[in-house]
Image (cartoon, helix red, strand yellow):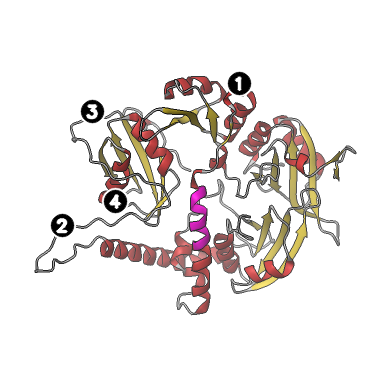
Amino acid sequence: MEETSSGIRLSAECLDEPPNSRVFVVLGKDTGEALIRERFSPFGDIQNIWLLRDRRTNESRGIAFIKFARSSQACRAMEEMHGRSLLPDSKPIKVFIAQSRASGSHRDVEDEELTRIFVMIPKTYTEEDLREKFKMYGDIEYCSIIKNKTTGESKGLGYVRYLKPSQAARAIEECDRSYRAILAEPKNKSSESFEHDYYSNSMRPELRGNTLPFCMQPEFCGFEKAETRIQEPVSKRLSVVSRLPFIQEQLFALFDLVPGLEYCDVQRDPHTNSGYAVIQYSTAASAIYAKYKLHGFEYPPGNRLTVIFLEDGNDSSDLIRKMATQLVTAQVSSALRSNSAMVQQYRTPPQAFGGTSAPQLLQPQTDAILPPPKKKVPPDTSVKERLFILFHPHPLPVNVLEDVFCRFGQLISVYLVAGKNVGYAKFADRASASEAITALHGKIVNGVRLKVRLADSPSEEPNKRQRTY
């Protein structure tokens, strides 16, 4: 049981009831509770505010938790306040949905994971029916109905994906209870083991004797830095937050894998029993590397760490300028290695009796569950649905894409946009396109992460700014 500022004692379970109703805020150390309440109260009923303080000095650590009465209120506060300043002359704050103990979540709460809901529906519902029932709660990006792959009949289950987390939360709160709406598990949940292996396997070789400086490793430079909505200030200090409490010696050993660790200060949030620590390195380069290596790392397994930069009062602009040339060089090196590997993988093998054979397509290496390959339909078939595909860090070859997308049936063609990390897939059947979105969005194919959604109509594309994630 924990005592709130109003004198009411709450159990740890109540702190996250309903799930995703608590936000985690990174702000200035001189920010008081009154200002926080003033700026966040327009978004809903604030049940409590906690400011984390140093045990020895009682000074604020620049971390706050705000508990709202409803999930939609917390989501709207995150959407509106992330990247804004509480005062005209203050630095922008960062606002995230706090990890929820009550929901049993073992993952980072990313915006994209808060926009998709899972509902129970009558088996007679079409995708149009599903969209019509749920469009009153916000802008829907796509709907899909889960069908029996053998019979093609609806299983009475569906997904609705909204553009904003607050819209999905509102749908869960306000829709008819017969739908039993809940937040859907993240589509890339099955890829967490891949990410875990990536973090684990890619760290020690660089520390054992790789000739490149660790700040120039290709996978570090190519790591997707667009995971946050505003550019983070670079510093030598990191904030580490966990759903579970930390053990000082173990956390120190983990972050000491990156050279330059100066200290590891472990604290515990008394209101949630979650772990909190401040990590400091001797250089900003070490902190950058540790941040992008260990953010999302599962420690212990099933408990993902949230790692962000903390302001340390230093001007990092000079450091960034000095590192720029090295980073660009590493990016070029990474691109050359990727292209070389791709050419090697799909190079035409020689036949046993001289000459060459047609290119052999290897089985795609992916964390997605793929059905068996199916034949493409004739190229002059009428297009019923187009899918927009975003690749990171580089596009896949067309033959690999065709092999992956044809498995959902009724594929007409796949093509890439020259000079861009995007492509399109044309389908002759909307249900097949919807199954491709559900199976492939957020998945990794041959080391490339895919983001798949419905494409804009051709008439809208020139006039519409491309959405980024």
Answer with left or right where residue 74 lies relative to residue 130: right
Residue at 37% x, 64% y is 332
Q: Secondary structure at mark 3?
A: loop
Q: Secondary structure at mark 4?
A: helix
Residue at 59% x, 22% y is 178
Q: Which residue is mark 2?
A: 358
Can you name the residue that lies furthest to the right here? 7
Answer with left or right where residue 210 lies relative to residue 32: left
Q: Secondary structure at mark 2?
A: loop
Nearer to us in this view, 345 or 371: 371
Q: Which residue is mark 4?
A: 400
Nearer to us in this view, 457 or 170: 170
Compared with 109, 179 (above or below) is above
Mark 2 against mark 3, which lies toward the viewer? Answer: 2
Please rate how many residues cluster around mark 4, counting C-alpha atoms within 10 Å: few if below 14, some from 14 to 19, many from 20: some
Which mark is drawn over residue 382?
3
Can you name the residue that lies furthest to the front here? 150
Compared with 260, 438 (above or below) is above
Residue at 61% x, 70% y is 283
Please rate how many residues cluster around mark 2, counting C-alpha atoms within 10 Å: few if below 14, some from 14 to 19, many from 20: few
